[in-house]
Image (tube, rainbow, N blue to C red):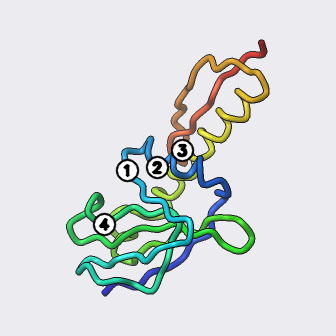
Amino acid sequence: MSAYAEFETIMREQRFLVEGLTAMGYNVEVSTEGTALYGYHGDERPERAHVILRRAQLDSASNDIGFARGAEGRFRAILSDYDRRIGYDDKWLGRVQQSYKERQTMAVAQAKGYIFRGKEVIQTPNGPQIRLQFVAR
């Protein structure tokens, strides 16, 4: 049984977290009250989450990955040691947060009346960086 660890994130808005994970190709399960995560043997774990990626879509030996809303309003990522070793690590979590931020920025810009003109991906030493381009109406 892999041990789970929790990791703080910048994410506060469930809508953009779900949209970001969906854009990354995941089928997302949402639970208003929080529901149990399951280990790779199908065993129910004590960890609970509000946004869940079930193990069946990850790797044959994966555990569920969850995002639980903390008392301060931010989501904490709940990941097993095994899943972190096979690629669901800090870089992956950074991509999740980047996808979240992209959706959030698009929504805010559109609400303020900006028109989306394009998206540019720039390669940096720390990996790809996304730049969204808008113009005023």
Q: Quadrant of residue 122?
A: top right
Q: Amino acid at mark 4?
A: Arg
| Residue 109 in picture, x, y percent from top left | 72, 29
Identify the residue under disc 1. Answer: 26
- Circle 2 packing at 10 Å, graded few (<14), some (14-19), many (20+), is many
Identify the residue under disc 3. Answer: 99
Specify which label sits upstream in the sequence, 1 or 3.
1
User: Circle 4 — which element?
Assistant: helix
Q: Using the image, determine if residue 83 lies above or below residue 134.
A: below
Q: For this rendering, which residue is in front, 34 or 112?
A: 34
Q: Amino acid at mark 1?
A: Tyr
| Residue 7 in picture, x, y percent from top left | 57, 71
Identify the residue under disc 2. Answer: 21
Specify which label sits upstream in the sequence, 1 or 4.
1
Distance from the alpha carbon under mark 2 to that under mark 4: 14 Å
Distance from the alpha carbon under mark 1 to that under mark 4: 11 Å
Q: Quadrant of residue 42?
A: bottom left
Q: Using the image, determine if residue 119 lies above or below residue 20.
A: above
Specify which label sits upstream in the sequence, 4 or 3.
4
User: Circle 3 — which element?
Assistant: helix
User: Circle 1 — which element?
Assistant: loop
Specify which label sits upstream in the sequence, 2 or 1.
2
Which dot marks residue 55? 4
| Residue 62 in picture, x, y percent from top left | 29, 70
Q: For this rendering, which residue is in front, 44 or 74?
A: 44
Q: Are the residues tagged 2 and 1 within 8 Å (C-beta)?
A: yes
Which quadrant of the figure contains the C terminus? top right
Q: Are the residues tagged 3 and 2 within 8 Å (C-beta)?
A: yes
Q: Are the residues tagged 2 and 4 within 8 Å (C-beta)?
A: no
